[in-house]
Amino acid sequence: MKIYLIDNTRKLKKVGKELQEYFNIETKENCKFKMTKNDYVILSDEVGNLEGLEKLKNIIILTIKKDYKYIWRLVNNHKALDIIDNALDENYIAQRIEKLVRRGL
């Protein structure tokens, strides 16, 4: 099992370092890669990385937008496991992702 971190922000680098002691983390530039059904993807909608996301599974999205309709569309269209506010503390985000991944094992 791997966790793919689609990383364009410093916030994700800090979260990746927190998770690296527990899981195998691999950093990618975009959503164009192959993954198994046991892998997870963490990305931020900040930069507009949502292209090609429909082919991926087990998606955790860090969002800066708090609009109800936008979040509802993300969950339903991309089948995201969780939507996390990007403004939260990095330690909290890492712990929340760790709980999600451990629950899925």
Image (tube, rainbow, N blue to C red):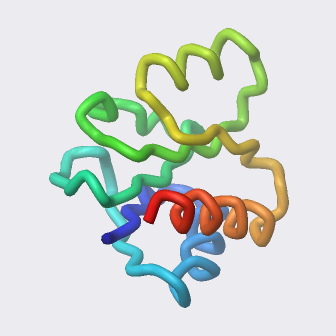
In the rendered image, the vertical position of residue 92 relative to residue 56, given as above or below: below
At a point 59% along the width and 57% down the height, the residue shown is 100
**Total number of numbered labels?**
0
Whether residue 44 sits left or right of residue 30 in the image: it is right
The image shows residue 37 at horizontal and vertical percentages of 25, 52
Q: Quadrant of the N terminus?
A: bottom left
The image shows residue 69 at horizontal and vertical percentages of 67, 10
Whether residue 10 sits left or right of residue 85 in the image: it is left
At a point 41% along the width and 53% down the height, the residue shown is 41
Whether residue 62 sits left or right of residue 91 in the image: it is left
Farthest residue to the top: give it. Answer: 69
In the rendered image, the vertical position of residue 100 relative to residue 14, given as above or below: above
Whether residue 12 sits left or right of residue 93 in the image: it is left
In the rendered image, the vertical position of residue 66 relative to residue 18, given as above or below: above
Farthest residue to the left: give it. Answer: 34
| Pick the front one: 5 or 30 | 5
The image shows residue 28 at horizontal and vertical percentages of 32, 61
Q: Quadrant of residue 64?
A: top right
In the rendered image, the vertical position of residue 31 relative to residue 16, given as above or below: above
| Pick the front one: 101 or 83 | 101
At a point 31% along the width and 49% down the height, the residue shown is 30
The image shows residue 20 at horizontal and vertical percentages of 51, 83
At a point 55% along the width and 60% down the height, the residue shown is 103
Q: Quadrant of the C terminus?
A: bottom left
| Pick the front one: 17 or 47 | 17
| Pick the front one: 40 or 10 | 40
